[in-house]
Amino acid sequence: MSTLHTVAPIARNKGLSLPLYGYLLILPALGLLLLFTHYPALATVWESVFSAARGGHPAHFVGLDNYRALLDDDTFMLSLRNNLLYAVITIPLAVGLALMMALAVNRRLRGNALVRAAFFIPSLLPMVAIANLWLFFYTPQLGLLNQLLSFFSLPAVNWLGEPGTALYSLMVVSVWREAGFFMIFYLAALQQIDPRLAEAAEIEGASRAYFFRRIQWPLLMPTTLFILINASMNAFRIVDQVIAMTNGGPDNRTSLLLFYIYRTAFSFWDLPSASAMTVVLLVILGAIALIKFNLLDKRAHYQ
């Protein structure tokens, strides 16, 4: 019996129409969504058009002045550029690595479960543990990476202290952490593909590369779209890793957008400016989501 046939008699017994009964059922979830998602977003937009209340002077309406001030904020512009570069590099690397790992473990081989667990464990570790682990790798002179360099008689590198390497060092940690998490979604999608398709391709003499390009990859597009949206959000909301490893240094070269928002709001107590930055961040994420849905959803194939 369908859910509709189950709910309809209950609604009639209570003297309610079926649509009204449905709205009442979703009311608790809708209330929580409005309270903890939509209201904070609207409050942020409202806060961004007022000045900060300081020295006993109340906040007053300033319109778009806070947004115009961001154009003159060199640290904000640098954080924005850093974050865009961070997203452009880490998203395709994490997604591509996750897909390769999923294809590698999507076989019935001995020890496959152990390999899957090894790939997935980094995504389960807390950020503090990950930061301390990679700080050991990146430590000048004594770190594991510099020990490897010294083995080949190469000079040591201050990975997190040099402006040219600090941001890329953070990128490596993010890719390492997220690839295993995204692998689980790809692995689940691969296991949902009808095995008869692989059998038919094998009978026809198709290579693995051809089967992946013509069959598996098109059928993985819905999963890829979901992963890309999540990877984009992760790339723009990273803050704990920056605090734990570099605190934005050196010379703001690892200052990312959400980290600068956090510092502006809770270190400088400039809530209107932080709200304006948050609105900019929301607009960026919304634009990325719209572009990906419009471009990739049309190419998605379903079995």
Image: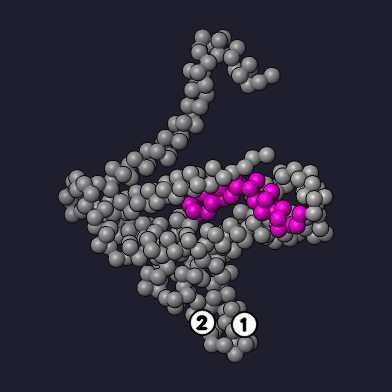
Please state the extent of the stretch shown in magenta in the rendering. 206-234
Residue 257 lies in quadrant: bottom left
Is 275 on the left or on the right of 32, as rendered?
left
Is 103 situated above or below 20?
below
Is 63 on the left or on the right of 173, as rendered?
left
User: Of the numbered discs in the image, which one, if any, rests on residue 148?
Assistant: 1
The residue at the point 61 percent across, 54 percent down is 182
The residue at the point 42 percent across, 76 percent down is 163
Task: State whether residue 128 appears in this view.
Answer: no
On-image quarter of the N terminus: top right
Characterize the local packing of mark 1: few (<14), some (14-19) or many (20 or more) Cα atoms within 10 angstroms: few
Q: Mark 2 belongs to which amino acid? A: Val
Q: Mark 1 belongs to which amino acid? A: Leu
User: Of the numbered discs in the image, which one, if any, rests on residue 180?
Assistant: none
Tell me, what colour scheme is on the image?
one colour
| Residue that mark 2 sits on | 157
Residue 99 lies in quadrant: bottom right
